[in-house]
Image: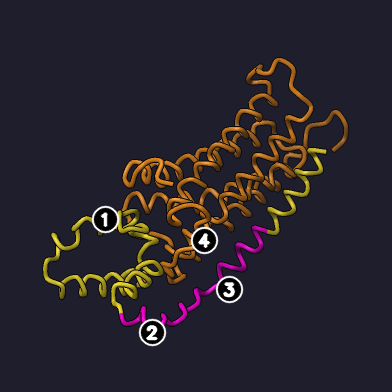
Chain colours: A yellow, B orange
Amino acid sequence: MLKRVVNALELVALLAAATFVVLLFAYRPTAKPAAPAAAAANPLVVGEQVFAANCSTCHGAHGEGAVGPRLSGGAVVRRYPNPADQIAVVEYTRTGLNRG
Amino acid sequence: MVAGSRPDVAAVERRLIAALLVGGAVAVSLGVYGRLHDPTHHALFTLFFTATLNLKAWFATVVVALALVQILTALRMYGKINVPRVAPPWLGDVHRLSGTLAFMFSLPVAYHCLWSLGFESHADQTRRFVHSILGCFFYGAFAAKMVVVRARNLPGWVLPTVGGVVFSALVGIWLTSSLWFFRTVGFPKI
């Protein structure tokens, strides 16, 4: 019985590995649907959506830091008190990270 | 092979070289993909975790736990430990089951690493650089082990050695990712 389960699971693992390879090449992130008008009017809501989609992977869901540095708790404001510098850093990081 | 004769040395060498080539091809392919692919920096599914990174840290921990089961069952099968005193008949199946589950748990983690973050090629980013190298090496070693497992008449030391290499690479991966995550970001940090 256990042997049958393992045999079946190995087949599933093989399929999963094949899917893994296909998705590496085939899967492209889809653009987020446009925010509702009321939400779009609120930059905090839009910013939250943009952060969740593009930044949370490295900086954590709440900006607590992970692969990327901590952003929450005033860390950004302390380091870059000028908002223009904050925008410049985001732009640099966004383009710089994709240079590989 | 004629009964009683020594294994055909050339055939053994061919199988070992085949395992090395397959493993090398897998490791290099993943490394090349990770280097050339533009990282998307997009999160994947999170299940009940707070974020993808939390999921990855815990999935990798599950993989290590399952790999430990593999090591212990292998040690018992090779008679290196005597617990339990009589090896149950299902020991080999549990060994395969834990290995298969470990592999399946590792796939979403590796997918996010490669697809979302890419290969860290700057050696000054030591942790990420070592993690990237070990990640590619792990799957190469794993592929080589799959070839070795199915090859016949290989010397007895080959399979435990390759298995040990796979496990060592996995531990290195865990140390440079999950342990770092738990120490830096927090624990248990679900």
Image-based side of A60 in relation to B140, left or right: left
Q: Secondary structure at mark 3?
A: helix
Camera-nearest label, 4 or 2: 2
Question: The residue marked by circle 3 belongs to what chain?
Answer: A
Q: Secondary structure at mark 1?
A: loop
Tally the marks: 4
Q: Residue at x 55, y 62 (%)?
A: B29
Mark 4–mark 1 distance (CA, rounded to whole Å): 22 Å
Question: Toward which corner of the image does residue A90 lie, by quadrant?
Answer: bottom left
Q: Residue at x 41, y 67 (%)?
A: B41
Closer-to-camera residue (B157/A95): A95
The circle on residue A26 is 3
Image-based side of B66 in relation to B31, left or right: right
- Disc 2, disc 3: CB below 8 Å? no
Residue carrying label 4: B45
Identity of the residue furthest to the right in this view: B3
What segment is highlighted magenta in the picture?
Answer: A16-41
Mark 2–mark 3 distance (CA, rounded to whole Å): 32 Å
Image-based side of A32 in relation to B186, left or right: right
Question: The residue marked by circle 1 belongs to what chain?
Answer: A
* Discs 2 and 3 carry the same chain letter: yes
The circle on residue A37 is 2
At label 1, counting other C-alpha atoms closer than 10 Å, the crowd grade (few under 14, some 14-19, many 20 or more) is: some
The circle on residue A14 is none
Camera-nearest label, 1 or 2: 2
Q: Looking at numbered disc 1 in the image, what kind of residue is underneath it?
A: Arg
Residue carrying label 1: A70
* Discs 1 and 2 carry the same chain letter: yes
Q: Residue at x 74, y 43 (%)?
A: B151
Quadrant occupied by the N terminus of chain A: top right
Camera-nearest label, 3 or 1: 1
Question: The residue marked by circle 4 belongs to what chain?
Answer: B
